[in-house]
Image (cartoon, rainbow, N blue to C red):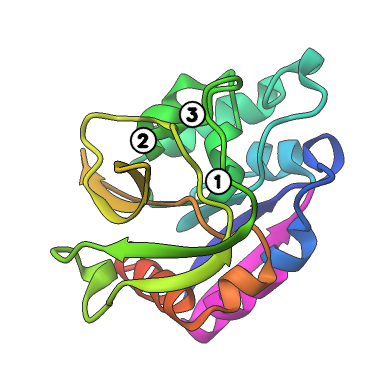
């Protein structure tokens, strides 16, 4: 069975905008249905510091550290995260993970996105039309859909990103979901997922199910 560590925003990674405990529990249920044994860990630094060769999939459902004075993440966690990324094992990064681990440039390089304070933003949480682009297994059979969520806008996005889902604002395209395989590593970034209702939205849930299958095969 595939073994995953789900890093969930807690402690100095908790914030007033996200119920990480609820969204992580919902994700763990989805992963279980896909045959993935998942350990939810809300001590982010401890979770990363404990990554080892038995971890087949790293999932990050956490954001910016509220107390970065001791590093984001802490030094021991930083070393293990770098080691995991260098091992080319798969990564699933969700929503606010684009703002996480500011002291690890390899994190942004791996997932292809960074929330830039003062530049990146999102319209008010509400209904949004998500456009789907074909061409990747995570969007097989998918159509455009409507979801109630935050639409991350003006992320710093890597040149290699080929969006599988996006939103448009004032005629400008903003990537939201993508999958990539480079240097032997598979990665999926999903900017949706602000709350449980987003993850339970059938079209979004189907994206996540396909993403997990792709990451673990």
| Percent x, y of residue 199 | 58, 71
Residue at the location (77% across, 38% down)? 13
Res. 194 image quadrant = bottom right
> Quick one: 132 or 103, which is closer to the camera?
132
Instruction: State the separation of the CA atoms marked 3 and 2.
Output: 15 Å
| Percent x, y of residue 162 | 21, 46
Q: Would you call the spot at circle 2 few (<14 residues within 10 Å), some (14-19), or many (20 or more)?
A: many
Q: Which residue is labeled 1 in the image?
A: 52
Check contact, mark 3 vs mark 2: CB within 8 A: no
Instruction: State the separation of the CA atoms marked 1 and 2.
Output: 23 Å
Q: Would you call the spot at circle 1 few (<14 residues within 10 Å), some (14-19), or many (20 or more)?
A: few
Range shown magenta: 25-42
- Which secondary structure, mark 2? loop
Check contact, mark 1 vs mark 3: CB within 8 A: no
Q: Which residue is labeled 3 in the image?
A: 82
Residue at the location (21% across, 41% down)? 182
- From what the image shows, is residue 100 above or below residue 44? above
- Which secondary structure, mark 3? helix
Instruction: State the separation of the CA atoms marked 1 and 3.
Output: 12 Å
| Percent x, y of residue 94 | 53, 52
Q: Earlier in the sequence, mark 1 or mark 3?
A: 1
Residue at the location (43% across, 32% down)? 154
16 to the left or right of 145: right
**Of labels 3 and 2, the one closer to you:** 2
Tag on residue 112?
2
Residue at the location (69% across, 45% down)? 47
């Amino acid at each position: 069975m595939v073994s995953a560590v789900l890093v969930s925003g807690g402690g100095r990674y908790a914030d007033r905008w996200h119920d990480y405990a609820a969204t992580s529990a919902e994700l763990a249920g989805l992963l279980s249905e896909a045959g993935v044994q998942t350990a939810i860990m809300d001590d982010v630094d401890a979770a990363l510091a404990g990554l080892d060769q038995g971890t087949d999939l790293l999932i990050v459902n956490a954001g910016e550290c509220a107390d970065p004075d001791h590093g984001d993440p802490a030094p021991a966690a930083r070393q293990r995260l770098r080691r995991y990324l260098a091992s080319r094992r798969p990564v699933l990064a969700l929503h606010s993970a684009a703002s996480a681990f500011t002291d690890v440039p390899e994190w942004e390089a791996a997932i292809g996105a960074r929330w830039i304070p003062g530049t990146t933003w999102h319209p008010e949480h509400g209904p949004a039309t998500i456009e789907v682009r074909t061409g990747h297994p995570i969007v097989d059979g998918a159509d455009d859909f409507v979801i109630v969520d935050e639409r991350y806008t003006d992320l710093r996005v890597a040149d290699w990103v080929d969006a599988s889902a996006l939103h448009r604002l004032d005629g400008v395209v903003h990537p939201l979901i993508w999958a990539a395989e480079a240097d032997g590593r598979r990665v999926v970034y999903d900017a949706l997922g602000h709350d449980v209702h987003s993850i339970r939205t059938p079209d979004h849930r189907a994206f996540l199910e396909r993403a997990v299958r792709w990451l673990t095969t």
